[in-house]
Image (cartoon, rainbow, N blue to C red):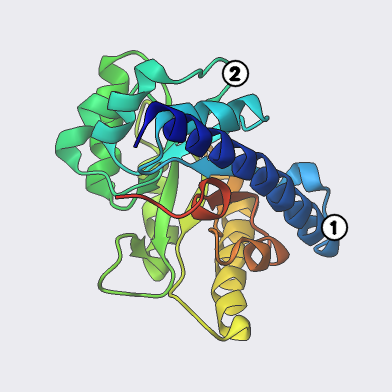
Amino acid sequence: MTERSLTEYREARCRDIEENIKEIRDNIAEAAIQSGRNPEDVRLMAVTKTVEPCFINHAIHCGIDLIGENRVQEFLGKKPELDLDGVDCHLIGHLQTNKVRQIVGEVSTIQSVDSLKVAREISKQSVKNDLVTKILLEVNVGEEESKSGMPYEAVEDLLPEIAALPGLSVEGFMAIPPICEDEVVLRGYFSKMNQLYVDMKDKNIDNINVNTLSMGMSADYVQAILEGSTLVRVGSSLFGARVY
């Protein structure tokens, strides 16, 4: 690709990102109002997996103030090139215990806490660095063997144990439902997660500040909002199809 064609490609992609952000925000607002909430009650996360820093920065300049990355190494590699002033960064991908040390302190929130073992390691590294790490508990709402996440039925028992760990603040839940063509079935998974969210919020467990229900991605964020999502994680609908 010549320098000129590369410039034209980047300019065109930046225009697409601007238009996509506007369309997504309009969809979020409409769905939020339909669910009886204010549009401001739903946060938009730009998922940056495989996205080049120049396009992430353009999205930030267009008002995106929350980004989510799937892999520890990819985020750490990009971070020096990102304009992160005023931007909240989350890790949303599966986290192995041997990577916890590298990511604690680099992001404000780890959304993918799927076991007591991972929570304990985040606690250990947070205490060592004299900080508090916000976490979401990832729930395998569809009970799929191929997906990470703690079993839905185990959350109520695990929650107080995780909440008691020092250096952590449990902020809520994250889920990825099974791929569904039937919207009724899909919304049923989101509704089930919302019920858990409401139930756990009402319990007032110490060291738990349940305020986030992270569910809904490019293909289903509207349905997720209609069922109570407070944070949607949008990647390809915002940045375009991923380039691997």
Q: Quick check: marks 1 and 2 in contact, CB under 8 Å?
A: no
Q: Compared to 198, does 111 lie above or below?
A: above
Q: Please name the residue that numbered disc 2 is placed on.
A: 86
Counting from the top left corner in percent of width and height, residue 165 is at: 34, 34
Q: Looking at the rendering, in which quadrant would you find the N terminus?
A: top left
Task: Give the amino acid type for the residue marked by disc 1 in the picture.
Answer: Ile
Total marks placed: 2
Could you classify mark 1 by the number of other residues whose Cα lies within 10 Å: few (under 14), some (14-19), or many (20 or more)? some
Q: Position of residue 141 (x, y in %)?
A: 44, 70
| Distance from the alpha carbon under mark 1 to that under mark 2 | 27 Å
Front residue (pair 107, 61) = 61
Q: Residues within 10 Å of mark 2 (few under 14, many from 20)?
A: few
Q: Is residue 110 visible in this depiction of the protein?
A: no
Which residue is found at the position 26% from the left and 38% from the top?
120
Going by the image, does 226 lie left or right of 150?
right
Q: Secondary structure at mark 1?
A: helix
Q: Is residue 121 left or right of residue 234?
A: left
- As displayed, is residue 159 above or below residue 82? below
Q: Position of residue 163 (x, y in %)?
A: 42, 40
The picture quadrant where one finds residue 220 is bottom right
Residue at 61 percent of width and 66 percent of height: 195
Sequence order check, earlier mark of 1 and 2:
1
Q: Between residue 58 and residue 135, name the one nearer to us.
A: 58
Q: Residue furthest left?
A: 98
Secondary structure, mark 2, is loop
For the point 80% across and 52% down, the residue is 29
Instruction: Provide the residue designation for mark 1.
Output: 33
